[in-house]
Image (tube, rainbow, N blue to C red):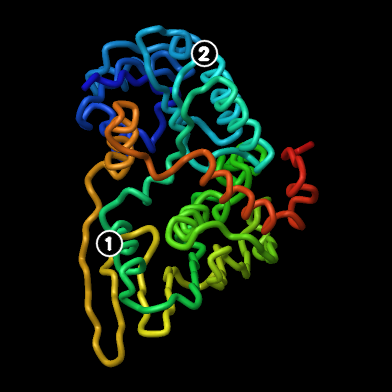
Amino acid sequence: MKTIRWGMIGCGDVTEVKSGPAFYKAKNSKLVAVMRRSGALAQDYAKRHNVPNWYDNANAIINDPNIDAVYIATLTDTHAHYALRCAAAGKAVYCEKPMGMTYAQCHQMLGAARAAGVPLWVAFYRRALPRYQKLQELIGGGAIGNVRMVLSRQFASSDDTSGMRVSDGQSPWRADPARSGGGLFFETACHTLDSLDYFFGPIEEVRGFAANKAGIYRSEDTVTASYRFASGVFGSGAWCYSADHSYEMNEIVGDKGRIVYQTSKPTPIRLYRGESVEEFKIEDPPHVHQPMIQSIVDEMNGVGTCLSTGESAGRTSWVMDRLLAEFYPGRDRDWIPGG
């Protein structure tokens, strides 16, 4: 079993605990180099995580013959740029989510990976988490019978979204669609939509509305959606990031019961059947990317399969484009923020 040698482009907050340590804690995996535009910050990260090499230029990662795979952990507006360069250099890619700014970018990334004959995975890591594996087991095992529909709700109060506000004339990157691709909906609800793709297969028809109700920042803060999966399951969702309270829930309704769970937090999964309620308390691992990264390493060694591919992530991007098409005109074609 060979050791997969990783390079990491971007050393932001997400890499400190959620992802970075997983690359050197997974079996047969080693983080050998990191890159950040600030050399001092790259050096600091490398020192704290015992990474032997650090750079302030992505070329050093992309062109290093001693690196097998690259983790792209930059802002969404550069995902496609780096993925195309990595593919051209023959490097396998693990890209942060959202995969690209639009489905058109995702399609371009996929095409480049296929042409180069390299794999492309996307960091919808929840697919590999133990609690999501349990959800898949319950659904697939018929715990609630035939699934009829799924309902998703996520609300956030102004206190919980204070980090989205303009400060000193500058918008945080998550509130700037030119850098993030959208707002909190685009950044966070994609996890819910991707997990539903994992449970029920591709969404084949989607309709929705998006708006900015509060006027605190430029991007969308309220979205409603209805969709139909190719498997026949119906779904609906409502997301509001300018509400009076914070709340999250997904409810999967079957003809023999229902399942309630949260996307973002490892609250107990609740299985309702008639008058009975069964709870499954399954904690997330300390480094939530680690199960996904382990599956990538295993796949590269020919002993496993990663559940989050460029193809599956592209489907989620397709759904997001259609939900945001009216708010960002032309997005469901080849929309470019600010273009």
Residue labelled with disc 1: 134
Compared to residue 241, the image places residue 69 above or below, namely above
Taking the image as shown, residue 92 lies to the left or right of residue 233, namely left
The image quarter in which residue 274 lies = bottom left
Q: First in sequence: mark 1 or mark 2?
A: 2
The image quarter in which residue 79 lies = top right
Residue labelled with disc 2: 89
Compared to residue 97, the image places residue 64 above or below, namely above
Compared to residue 31, the image places residue 245 above or below, namely below
Q: Where is residue 285 in the image (x, y as percent from the top left)?
A: 22, 48
Q: Which amino acid does label 2 sit on?
A: Ala
Give the distance between the C-alpha atoms of the residues marked 1 and 2, in whole angstroms: 38 Å
Q: What element carries label 2?
A: loop
Taking the image as shown, residue 242 lies to the left or right of residue 294, namely right
Q: Of 192 and 112, which appears nearest the observer?
A: 112
Q: What residue type is labelled 1?
A: Lys
Q: Of 191 and 197, which appears nearest the observer?
A: 197
Residue 1 got which mark? none
Quadrant where the N terminus is found in the figure: top left
